[in-house]
Amino acid sequence: MKKILITGCFGQIGSELTMRLRKDYGVENVVATDIRRIEGSPITENGHFEILDVMDKEKMLEIAKKYEVDTFIHLAALLSAVAEAKPTLAWNLNMGGLVNALEVARELGLKFFTPSSIGAFGPDTPKDNTPQDTLQRPTTMYGVTKVAGELLCDYYFEKFGVDTRGVRFPGLISYDTVPGGGTTDYAVEIYYEALKHKKYTSFIGEGTFMDMMYMPDAIDAIVKLMEADPTKLIHRNAFNITAMSFEPTQIADSIRKFIPEFTFDFDVDPIRQGIANSWPNSIDCSAAKAEWGFDPKFDLDRMTKDMLENLSVKLN
Ligand code: AKB
């Protein structure tokens, strides 16, 4: 990667990835885009920024040409809970944005990354140690767009030789930017509420295991996969990756190690619980480890310590 274009730069992944890539590859070499401008943000103030609606393919192409990028990281998409509330918009945005981005990558010969998700699995998928290659019949609109996106990326590689790469992200936990409308968001909210009010009511029920990962490991994974030797990649798109699997009581117990007075209860949201029930408990990421050295550093307690330390600085 030498000169990188990012969509969705103000999203949960984009905001941290943009800063990391500018640090690693040079401020001049990262072009951040989003549908709106956030004044005062370091992303807009210290580097290239362009407003881009990913449905506007001509503008996307124009920006990619203007900055002569060689790599495209396409992040703009709706998350699972909001996609379930607005399924037509989710289909149009998640698929329309992706096909535009892949077309730009094809026309200009760009290396390409876009994330899939554990949402690409469905209720018939094996729930434990979910294999890399397995049954995928998701029952959410988010999942439908993620499976279709995985297939589309495979197609652009096979048919047009676009160097497409991608991972299936689990729930991502970070202190920098809050996620917008995901099923795994409870595992971020809980840290904010623990610090602000010393209590949290989970919208995901007891005993619901889902895969999770701390954002620094997620950012490392993107960089590592994009820098991986292509001859070593048997899979290309949609590598299973995860750092931990837990259910709500376990994250509450982890927080209690640092905030003993923290209290916790449940008020289950049937929509998001239904989505969570259709996803795996824990996925197998041995293909990512073997093919490009995926190696997450944070387990639950290490993540909790780091989250609470950084969030308390942010909230004060
Ligand atoms: C969501 O909950 O929608 C996302 C995901 C796991 O893809 N965090």
Image (cartoon, rainbow, N blue to C red):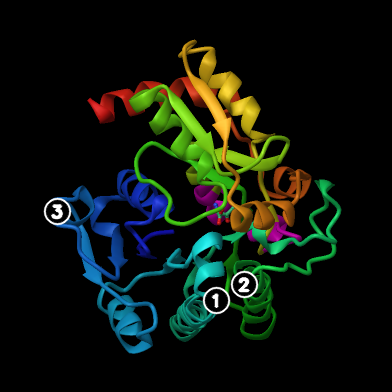
Give the residues in magenta: 222-236
Inspect the magenta stretch and tell me whether residue 235 lies in it.
yes
Q: Main secondary structure of the magenta part?
A: helix
Check disc 3: other Cα within 10 Å, few if <14, some if 14-19, many if 20+.
few
Q: Residue furthest front?
A: 267
Amino acid marked by disc 2: Met
Residue 235 in percent (x, y) is at: 73, 61
Rendered position, 141 above or below 61: above
**Mark nearer the N terminus (1 vs 3):** 3
* The disc label shown at residue 45, or none: 3
* The disc label shown at residue 87, or none: 1
Q: Is label 1 in contact with label 2 (beta carbons under 8 Å)?
A: yes
Check disc 2: other Cα within 10 Å, few if <14, some if 14-19, many if 20+.
many
Q: Closest to the observer: 232 or 54?
A: 54
Amino acid marked by disc 1: Pro
Query: How many discs appear?
Result: 3
**Mark nearer the N terminus (3 vs 2):** 3
